[in-house]
Amino acid sequence: MENNLITIHVEDREGVTKELEIPTDINLSLMEVLKGSGYEILATCGGIALCATCHVEVLDGADNLPEPEDNELDMLDTLPDADDDSRLSCQLRLTDENDGLKIRIRGSLQ
């Protein structure tokens, strides 16, 4: 990766997939990157793992993400549609190792 730039693949709620090129040195969470890229993410808690409106399903690349902390797991446990591939995008900081990550946006819009 040149200039700390990675590509991730994002599937929106309608099933449309787009590639995003993201610099890994911007120190933003995946949730902030998605919001900044025009995706509808409520993020009502401001990114502190208390609302789960930034829920994503990791389709590929989960092995290169950090393990979820207890507060993220507790919040995911409250979601009826969460599974082993679920993460809160507010808790994910992307690195060069996340090049090629594939996610599907699942969070609520209510």
Image (tube, rainbow, N blue to C red):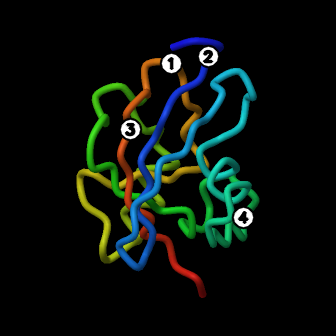
As helix, strand or loop, the secondary structure at mark 2 comes to helix
Q: Is residue 46 left or right of residue 57?
A: right
Dot placed on the residue nearer the N-terminal end, 2 or 3: 2
Q: Residue furthest bottom?
A: 110
Q: Which residue is mark 3?
A: 101
Left/right of residue 106 with respect to residue 30 in the rendered view? left
Upstream in sequence: badge 3 or badge 1: 1
Q: For mark 4, what is the residue?
A: 45
Q: Which residue is mark 2?
A: 4
Q: Taking 34 as reference, is 64 above or below it? A: above
Q: Is residue 45 above or below residue 64?
A: below
Real-space CA distance between mark 4 and mark 1, rounded to the nearest whole angstrom: 27 Å
Mark 3: which amino acid? Leu
| Distance CA(mark 2)–CA(mark 3) | 15 Å
- CA distance separating discs 3 and 1: 10 Å
- Cα distance between the residues tagged 4 and 2: 29 Å
Per the image, the residue denoted by label 1 is 96
Residue 107: percent from the left, percent from the top? Answer: 49, 71
